[in-house]
């Protein structure tokens, strides 16, 4: 009897202790909600890419961010959160005025771009061009692949698709890209085909300019091809958006198999289409490598004052079998 | 620690205990309430601060506008007021951008602040250049710089606007979270208070039970004692409060009562033993007396002896002696037989005849006995030995030693539906006082003289009363000294 009473007496302080612990925990939970920890970094690099091809750039940015964090650098997709859509040159100008520590930018051969890059370099901000170069400028490094190599790869795939050595090839070009990269690719395709077939008599390589200046206009232009009377035997896409548009249109208009397609980039949807043989092959740049190398090049320059002028990014062709394997790995 | 508290608790008075319990409960509720209200106050404060960052951005935006408009005004007018306004606004704007983040972080908002700061500093130096160019009247330079500044001004605005938007989004989320937290706090407060109240109730229940339990035990023991059971265990005294004192006193009381009862029982037992011994002695004495008396007059022996005597007298032709002995034998036989039973009136009268005959032989015919008996009443049953004692009294106190001729008359007759038995003598008589004494049974006590057979008037009166259930009347009349006495018995007819 006495033990029981004492037991109850001991129990009480524990009850109150529990109540206060609950309160304490609750107080902490409410008080600690806001801090939402962030890390600080030593340097701030701005990454500026043209509009479009969002999936591709998202992957490049992701790997650049990761690489940067390892090196105590924060890479920002400059202007991404702004209420106004500024173009690449405007963003480049703002990044310079905002005194970032380094700039990663897609280059072109426009004079304005060259001037801005030079201005940045003058202001002590190192610049790395990515995917496409700005050869005239004093940029520190170009990270990308050789466009001629990419074209050769396309050419080899076209040859596989036209075993008889005859047919019509249509290459989709982005009208807004003013640099020479597309021309280089086209040249390489033609030269590869000519070399293999002896002449280009049996194979015609045409181009189709896609107007991407207005929103959604690319998709409409590509659908126009499928609505046309004559369809090419092989359709070549040079960027990820065009690839997805073409593949959707082929499915919608029931032209799968009628038109063979070579895509660009290896996003999940594109891999899926390749694995289903809707797209027969896709040429992909190693986006992770591209992001990594661009940060590495900037860092190298900032720390040592010197870096390579060119860093090559691997290209690979993904066939349906490989796509299936990759899909399984995912 | 706990033991020390328990010890302390035991020495407290009831009032102190109850006060401690209630103060403890009250303090706990108060403390929790204070704590909770502090939390809620803190949260309310933070709700107030939620949109502070938006306010700051708006102020920054206003300061930027001020710089831009004052610059434009100065370019337009080159007035000293505009100049002054420009410096003031420039200072204000600088003060504001000094509050912005400079660190490189992965927090998008902070990073945007950093960008705004960089752009703003660039803008301020640009504006400064414009002012200098204006002063130097370098029209071409300040014209082109102003265009750049305008673009930059728009861009900074866009940055501020975008940051403001993002912050607003975040703040709205924070606000929502805070509001949810507030609601959650309400529920938790309620829960905690409930737990606390339950805890307090159990605290009060347990502590008051500690106070009341000894009382209960005391009450139970008191009940036991009230039912007469003094063999209860001592109640343990657990605390030194009022209940403890009462318990101690109760224990002592029970102990005292128990001792007292033990003593009383012992005394009574001793007295009983004494009484028992006394009674035994008395009974032995009586027994001895009786045996003695029995030995003295064994009526059977006497009766048989007398019968033998009578037969002897017959054989010797002594007729009068034989008759005498027969009468004596008859007298004793009646005594032997009829002592505890009733008898018929005839038998009683016969006994009187025997007795008178014996006396007349002894006293040479001094007694003149006559009787007048209604023959129809001879079968009436009466207690035995009632007439002979009366006749004996008439002889002993009435006519013995009388100078003149002594006469005794026995008459039995019916009167007013009752039977009247009268014994009259012409002897010494009695005064009224003496009659009263005799009737009240105060006369002399038992007369165990040698001549008496031991049955007195009082005995006769008592037996009549018992036999007739109080319906018999006994009366004595005498007109005074030497005027004779009459004893009259009135009994109901059967």
Image: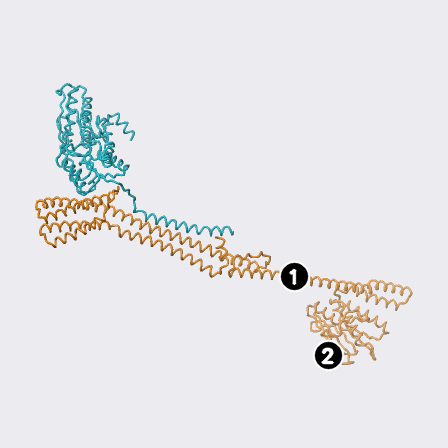
Question: From the viewer's perspective, is residue A212 above or below residue B386?
Answer: above
Q: Secondary structure at mark 2?
A: helix
For the image shown, how many numbered marks are present on the structure? 2
Query: Looking at the figure, which quarter contains the C terminus of chain A?
Result: top left
Q: Colour of chain B?
A: orange
**Chain letter for the residue marked with disc 1 in the picture:** B
Q: Secondary structure at mark 1?
A: helix
Classify mark 2: residues with Cα within 10 Å, few (<14), some (14-19) or many (20+): few
Question: From the viewer's perspective, is residue B477 above or below residue B6?
Answer: below
Q: Which chain is cyan?
A: A
Nearer to the camera, B199 or A10: A10
- The answer to whether B312 appears left or right of A220 in the picture is right
Could you tell which of marks 1 and 2 lies nearer the N-terminus?
1
- The answer to whether B136 appears left or right of B326 in the picture is left
The picture quadrant where one finds residue B358 is bottom right
**Chain letter for the residue marked with disc 2 in the picture:** B
Nearer to the camera, B196 or B115: B115
Where residue B151 sits: x, y (%)?
13, 44
Classify mark 1: residues with Cα within 10 Å, few (<14), some (14-19) or many (20+): few
Residue A220, can we see it?
A: no
Of the numbered discs in the image, which one, if any, rests on residue B265?
1
Of the residues tagged 1 and 2, which is closer to the observer? 1
Residue A20, can we see it?
A: yes
Where residue A245 sits: x, y (%)?
18, 32
- Quickly name the residue at label 2: B433
Of the numbered discs in the image, which one, if any, rests on residue B252?
none
Where residue B144 sits: x, y (%)?
10, 44
Where residue B177 sits: x, y (%)?
29, 47
Q: Same subunit under labels 1 and 2?
A: yes
């Amino acid at each position: 009897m006495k033990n029981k009473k004492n037991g109850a007496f001991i129990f009480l302080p524990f009850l109150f202790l529990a109540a206060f612990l609950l309160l304490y925990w609750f107080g902490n939970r409410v008080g600690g909600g806001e801090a939402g920890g962030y890390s600080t970094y030593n340097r701030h690099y701005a990454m500026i890419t043209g509009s479009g091809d969002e999936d591709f750039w998202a992957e490049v940015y992701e790997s650049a961010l990761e690489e940067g964090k390892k090196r105590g650098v924060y890479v920002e997709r400059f202007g991404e959160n702004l209420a106004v859509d500024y173009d690449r040159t405007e963003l480049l100008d703002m990044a310079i005025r905002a005194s970032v520590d380094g700039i990663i930018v897609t280059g072109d051969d426009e004079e304005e771009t060259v001037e801005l890059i030079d201005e940045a370099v003058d202001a002590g901000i190192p610049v790395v061009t990515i995917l496409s170069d700005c050869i005239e400028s004093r940029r520190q490094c170009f990270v990308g692949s050789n466009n001629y190599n990419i074209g050769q790869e396309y050419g080899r795939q076209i040859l596989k698709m036209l075993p008889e050595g005859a047919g019509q090839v249509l290459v989709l070009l982005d009208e807004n890209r003013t640099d020479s990269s597309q021309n280089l690719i086209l040249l390489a395709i033609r030269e590869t085909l000519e070399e293999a077939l002896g002449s280009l008599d049996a194979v015609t390589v045409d181009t189709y300019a896609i107007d991407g200046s207005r929103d959604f206009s690319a998709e409409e232009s590509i659908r126009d091809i499928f609505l046309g009377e004559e369809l090419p035997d092989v359709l070549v896409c040079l960027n990820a958006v065009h690839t997805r548009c073409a593949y959707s249109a082929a499915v919608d208009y029931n032209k799968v198999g009628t038109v063979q397609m070579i895509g660009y980039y290896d996003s999940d949807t594109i891999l899926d289409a390749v694995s289903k043989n809707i797209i027969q092959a896709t040429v992909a740049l190693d986006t992770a490598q591209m992001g990594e190398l661009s940060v590495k090049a900037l860092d190298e320059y900032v720390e040592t004052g010197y870096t390579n002028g060119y860093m090559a990014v691997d290209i690979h062709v993904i066939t349906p079998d490989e796509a299936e394997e990759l899909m399984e790995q995912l | 620690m706990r033991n020390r508290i328990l010890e302390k608790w035991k020495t407290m008075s009831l009032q102190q205990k109850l006060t401690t319990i209630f103060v403890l409960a009250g303090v706990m509720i108060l403390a929790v309430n204070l704590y909770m209200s502090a939390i809620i106050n803190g949260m309310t404060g933070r709700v107030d601060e939620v949109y502070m960052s938006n306010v700051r951005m708006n102020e920054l935006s206003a300061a930027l506008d001020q710089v831009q408009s004052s610059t434009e005004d100065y370019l337009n007018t080159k007035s000293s007021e505009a100049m002054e306004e420009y410096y003031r606004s420039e200072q204000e704007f600088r003060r504001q951008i000094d509050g912005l983040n400079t660190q490189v972080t992965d927090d998008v908002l902070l990073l945007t602040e950093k960008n705004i700061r960089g752009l703003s500093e660039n803008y301020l130096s640009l504006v400064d250049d414009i002012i200098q160019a204006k002063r130097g009247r370098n029209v071409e330079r300040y014209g082109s710089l102003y265009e750049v500044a305008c673009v930059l001004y728009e861009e900074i605005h866009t940055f501020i606007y975008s940051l403001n938007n993002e912050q607003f989004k975040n703040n709205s989320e924070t606000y929502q979270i805070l509001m949810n937290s507030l609601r959650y706090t309400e529920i938790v407060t309620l829960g905690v208070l409930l737990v606390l109240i339950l805890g307090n109730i159990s605290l009060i229940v347990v502590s008051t039970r500690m106070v009341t339990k000894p009382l209960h035990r005391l009450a139970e023991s008191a009940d036991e004692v009230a039912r007469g059971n003094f063999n209860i265990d001592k109640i343990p005294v657990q605390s030194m409060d009022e209940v403890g004192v009462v318990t101690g006193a109760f224990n002592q009381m029970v102990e005292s009562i128990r001792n007292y009862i033990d003593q009383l029982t012992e005394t009574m037992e001793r007295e009983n033993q004494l009484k028992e011994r006394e009674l035994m002695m008395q009974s032995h004495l009586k027994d001895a007396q009786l045996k003695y008396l029995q030995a003295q007059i064994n009526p059977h022996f006497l009766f048989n002896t007398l019968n033998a005597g009578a037969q002897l007298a017959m054989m010797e032709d002594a007729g009068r002696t034989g008759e005498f002995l027969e009468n004596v034998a008859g007298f004793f036989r009646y005594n032997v037989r009829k002592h505890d039973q009733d008898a018929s009136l005839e038998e009683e009268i016969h006994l009187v005849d025997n007795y008178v005959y014996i006396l007349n032989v002894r006293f040479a015919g001094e007694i003149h006995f006559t009787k007048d008996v209604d023959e129809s009443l001879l079968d009436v049953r009466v207690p035995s030995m009632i007439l002979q004692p009366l006749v004996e009294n008439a002889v002993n106190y009435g006519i013995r030693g009388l100078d003149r001729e002594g006469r005794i008359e026995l008459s039995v007759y019916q009167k007013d539906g009752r039977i009247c038995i009268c014994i009259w003598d012409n002897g010494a008589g009695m005064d009224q006082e003496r009659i009263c004494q005799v009737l009240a049974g105060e006369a002399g006590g038992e007369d165990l003289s040698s001549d008496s057979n031991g049955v007195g008037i009082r005995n006769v009166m008592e037996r009549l009363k018992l036999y007739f259930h109080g319906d018999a009347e006994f009366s004595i009349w005498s007109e005074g000294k030497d005027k004779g006495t009459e004893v009259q018995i009135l009994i109901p007819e059967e």
